[in-house]
DNA sequence: GAAGCTGGTTTCCAATGGAAACCTATCCTT
DNA sequence: AAGGATAGGTTTCCATTGGAAACCAGCTTC
């Protein structure tokens, strides 16, 4: 988390200073937009949001679906996303208590963008892996 | 960041296991898609890619524009993005050597999705901040 | 020859992420 | 009633990561 950088070259008060008409400056360290970006530019958040597109999912269901996520990080990420108003947490007093996580309307607006990222990764996986292989082959000495 | 705790220069050969027909699950831990997602679901990578949309930018220019990024992280992120084939690094033997970073065609295909994220953050910043305030107010002492 | 520009790397330290154990509560089995 | 399973977490421990700042190296200007 940044939010501690100095206004280098732009000694403006935080908050208002980045509400420029367009294009915005997400690049300003003090900008709240950066805080938002901090949250959603997260591997697990992307996977969780994408997973919730089909409807509400329970905690352990998410945990099993999103392979490799730890309970701690899942819990933390869900809390952050809930705090940001992107998803809702519903507790049902069933037998072993059931907790369902679902996208909020706000969260729903994000998932399109998020899905675009996830699907880009799927579609361009091969190209990226090829690029990595080429890069690694060059690694060490490149006459350029 | 690395799922299996291995150095990032050596992608696992477990790639085939997730090459299901379609859509292969980003949710599988060993899936290369996850490695791709790992890279692009990153705060700084998003800002860098978005910053390069207008054309090539030099190292220190990026550093000054993207407030709060450290040289180390900028360098590391640029290397990762270059390795993934998303951007290119051009060295010009000018007086103090000039290094320009630019989007590759592959990177260009990503920036639309990435820009969508950045712009979503800009547009929905207020809603997110309001949600956070509401959440924090509840968290204090609201049993109901 | 000190300072400043370029583009980095290195060092130190605190925050984060992952693995696995632990906790609370309610069933089901034995 | 003890033991296990399920559900939803929290806690603990430790390795990796991110950030701040120092350092490095080539070349120019003062």
Image (cartoon, coloured by chain):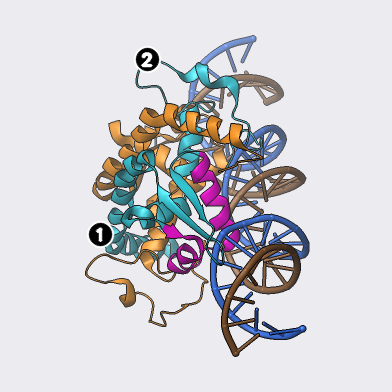
Chain colours: A orange, B cyan, C blue, D brown
Q: Nearer the viewer, residue B74 or A11?
A: B74
Which residue bears the numbered disc 1? Answer: B123
Badge number at residue A77? none
Looking at the image, how many numbered discs can be counted on the residues? 2
Provide residue B66's location: percent of width, then percent of height.
44, 64
Q: Is residue A47 left or right of residue B2?
A: left
Prevailing secondary structure of the magenta residues: helix
Q: Earlier in the sequence, mark 1 or mark 2?
A: 2
Q: Secondary structure at mark 2?
A: loop
Query: Does B125 sit above or below residue D21?
Result: above
User: What segment carries the magenta color?
Assistant: B57-83
Residue B28 shows up from this direction:
yes
Q: Chain of mark 1?
A: B
Disc 1/disc 2 C-alpha distance (Å): 36 Å
Residue at x 56%, y 62% (from the top left corner): B97
Q: Alpha-carbon neighbours of circle 2 within 10 Å: few (<14), some, or many (≥20)? A: few
Residue at x 43%, y 55% (from the top left corner): B48
Q: Chain of mark 2?
A: B
- Within the magenta stretch, is there residue B74? yes
Q: Secondary structure at mark 1?
A: helix
Provide residue B53's location: percent of width, then percent of height.
33, 53
Which residue bears the numbered disc 2? Answer: B21
Residue at x 23%, y 66% (from the top left corner): A22
Q: Nearer the viewer, residue B97 or B73?
A: B97
Query: Does B103 sit above or below residue A65?
Result: below
Provide residue A21's location: percent of width, then percent of height.
22, 70
Query: Does A83 sit above or below residue A4?
Result: above
């Amino acid at each position: 988390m940044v939010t501690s950088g100095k206004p280098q070259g732009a000694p403006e008060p935080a908050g208002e200073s980045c509400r420029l008409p367009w294009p915005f400056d997400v690049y300003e360290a003090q900008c709240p937009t950066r805080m938002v970006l901090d949250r959603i530019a997260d591997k697990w958040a992307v996977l969780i949001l994408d997973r919730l597109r089909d409807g509400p999912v329970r905690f352990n269901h998410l945990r099993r679906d999103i392979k490799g996520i730890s309970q701690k990080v899942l819990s933390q990420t869900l809390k952050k996303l809930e705090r940001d108003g992107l998803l809702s947490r519903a507790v049902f007093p069933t037998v072993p208590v059931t907790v369902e996580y679902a996208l909020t309307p706000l969260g729903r607006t994000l998932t399109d963008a998020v899905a675009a990222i996830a699907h880009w990764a799927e579609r361009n996986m091969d190209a990226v892996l090829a690029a990595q292989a080429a890069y690694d082959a060059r690694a060490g000495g490149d006459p350029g």
